[in-house]
Image (cartoon, helix red, strand yellow):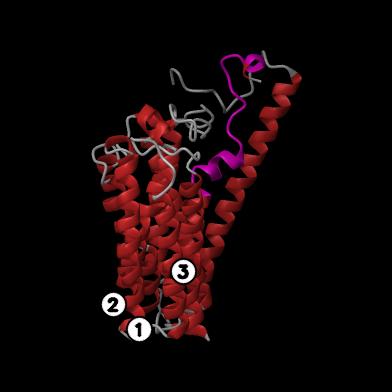
Amino acid sequence: MSGVLLGAQPGATAGDWLALLKPRVMTLVVFTGAIGLVIAPHRLNPVLALTAILCIAVASGAAGAINMWYDRDIDAVMKRTVNRPIPAGRISPAGALGYGIVLACAAVVVMAMATNLIAAAVLALSIGFYVFIYTMWLKRSTPQNIVIGGAAGAFPPVIGWAAATGSIGVLPLLLFAIVFFWTPPHFWSLSLYASGDYARAGVPMLPVVKGARHTRVCIMVYSLVLLPISLIPYILGLMGPIYGVTALATGLLFAFYCWRVLYDRQDARGNSLTRNAPARAAFKYSILYLFILFGACAADRLL
Amino acid sequence: MKGMPRTELAQSDWTPEARAEFLRRRRGRNFLLLAALGGFCLVIYAIALVKLHQYGTMW
């Protein structure tokens, strides 16, 4: 097609513009944000609640679009991202940046209109954190990028709660902590089998800088820290037995998956001899873990 | 505009297939924009209805 079109391109598809919003990331963000709304003590009008969830989704997508604009140079050298709309030349960088900024502003303004200023402020903070702190600063400068940057993905339950109540309580802050401590083992599992890509792009992910063996230990440590933190809502009486049992069972299973990553068959430098099968399994399970844990929050509150 | 792909206008040297592909993609983008703008209007309208009905004020 490119030969036929010479210098011109047929342009982006509607799907390319949607892909800029990182819809897979958005799924998890929307889910955790919706849980924040559901477990809040006040009931929001369904129309306003749906609008709040829509705003969280759009804000997440907007931050993703700005991230793709900023990271277009490293996306172009990573196999996993080379076909994204900007490095593939289907959408111009300026177009993507404008798209992200317009959507981010719209999401914050509509959130303020539909719910309250606190929810809108936290939403704006989460976008700013992801774009300025994670994307522009941490991602390219420290192997701890995921640890601190993980806060950006932990905001949605707080936003959901704030949308319903107009305040920020202990429970949403605990959910924030759960997502915060869940993020490192989740991303490091992925980076263990995508470290070649990150090294080529010069992104200082933990396996690139400290090696695979160190990363495996960190994954295990974070999964062990996550387990007691996930139990705090039950211990404090903020959640019931459905949540408590689910958190214990899924947390132990997560630790087991991470233990398998730690003791994967490996060479002297910690590189896997099994094509990182345990890391791939741990990455997949980590997503399921968060869905089940937050689903248990909702079940506990609604049943 | 140097180095930017030209996506707004069909090129005169395109083959019929390339032109058809360009028009198909442009139609898709236009429908997406229509849906987004229509959805945005509906959301604002719904928020206004609910807030005015429940609280008697928008803010």
Q: Report in which chain the residue with disc 2 lies.
A: A
- Left or right for A218, reference A114: left
Is A275 included in the stretch rendered in magenta?
no
Tag of residue A170? 2
C-alpha gap between disc 1 and disc 2 = 9 Å
What kind of residue is marked 1? Answer: Leu
Q: Is residue A132 above or below residue A155?
A: above
Residue A109 visible? The answer is yes
The range drawn in magenta is A3-23
Question: Quadrant of residue A42 in the image?
Answer: bottom left
Neighbour tally class for label 3: few under 14, some 14-19, many 20 plus, Cα within 10 Å: many
Residue displayed at 64% across by 23% down: B10
Element marked by disc 1: loop
Q: Mark 3 near mark 1, Cβ–Cβ under 8 Å?
A: no
For disc 1, the marked residue is A238
Q: Residue furthest right?
A: B16
Residue displayed at 44% across by 30% down: A78
Residue B48 visible? The answer is no
Tag 1 or tag 3, which sits nearer the N-term?
1
Residue displayed at 35% across by 68% down: A227
Question: Quadrant of residue B20 in the image?
Answer: top right
Q: Report in which chain the residue with disc 1 lies.
A: A
Label 3 vs label 2, nearer the camera: 3
For disc 3, the marked residue is A250
